Amino acid sequence: MINMNIQKLIVIIIALIIISMSIFTFSPYVIGIFHSVSQANSSQIPAENETTQESEQTIVQTAVCKGNARCFDGIITKIVDGDTLEIDNIPIRLALVDAPEYNEEGGAEAKEFVSSLCPVGSTAKVDEDDGQTEGSYGRIIAAIYCNKITLNAELITNEFATIYKEFYDVSEFSNEYWAKDYGC
């Protein structure tokens, strides 16, 4: 009788282990599918409550890059101004975003806004603009996803920057809601 109960207990434990392994194996795919569906209507990157750098990296990795140009995750190492920052020491210019230079009116506020949303040390995803792979003054032109937001969208919708209209006809991001609603 005891051997029978031990065997049942072992079977139950093995079943629980298999179920929990299945949940952890498929959860990134479920999050990625959820993100793909919701990304079209929101600048938010869906995620559960994150409290650690590790979970932040998981969320950034679920941001779906569009197009075929470079796409990579990294750490924000410097914020230059409202539309330029460095990720892993690589200079990035925000696609379709025209923020004032730091020494111009509104420039310091734009830089501070970027710092408040995506401070140095944050994990970010860089989605290079397929229409502008030649870059600008040695910078990659891209959309940046960090801390559950699309940085490009937040700068424009919160009026710290305007749409850089000169490039909307070539940018892969010109059909994004934040670009269309604000001038593309």
Image (cartoon, rainbow, N blue to C red):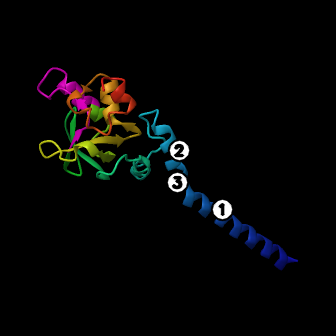
Q: Which mark is residue 34?
A: 2
Question: Along the line of sight, which residue is nearer the eye, 50 or 57?
Answer: 57
Amino acid type for the residue under numbered disc 3: Tyr
* SS type, badge 2: helix
Q: CA distance from mark 2 to mark 1?
A: 21 Å
Q: Secondary structure at mark 1?
A: helix
Q: In this view, which residue lies farthest toward the front?
A: 169
Q: Is residue 141 left or right of residue 12?
A: left
| Residue 129 visible to the viewer | no
102 part of magenta stretch:
yes
Q: Is residue 136 above or below residue 71?
A: above
Mark 3 lies on residue: 29
Q: Position of residue 75 (x, y in %)?
A: 29, 49
- Secondary structure of residue under mark 3: helix
64 or 77: nearer the viewer:
64
Give the magenta part as a residue range.
Answer: 92-113
Residue that badge 1 annotates: 19
Which badge, 2 or 1, comes first in the chain's sequence? 1
Inspect this view and state whether residue 65 appears.
yes
- Which amino acid type corresponds to the residue marked 1 in the rendered image? Ile
Task: Tell me: 134 left or right of 1.
Answer: left
List x then y, in percent, for residue 89.
19, 50
Contact between labelled residues 1 and 3, with CB atoms less than 8 Å apart:
no
| Pair 2/1: label in front | 2
Tell me if residue 67 is in the magenta stretch: no
Q: Residue furthest right?
A: 1
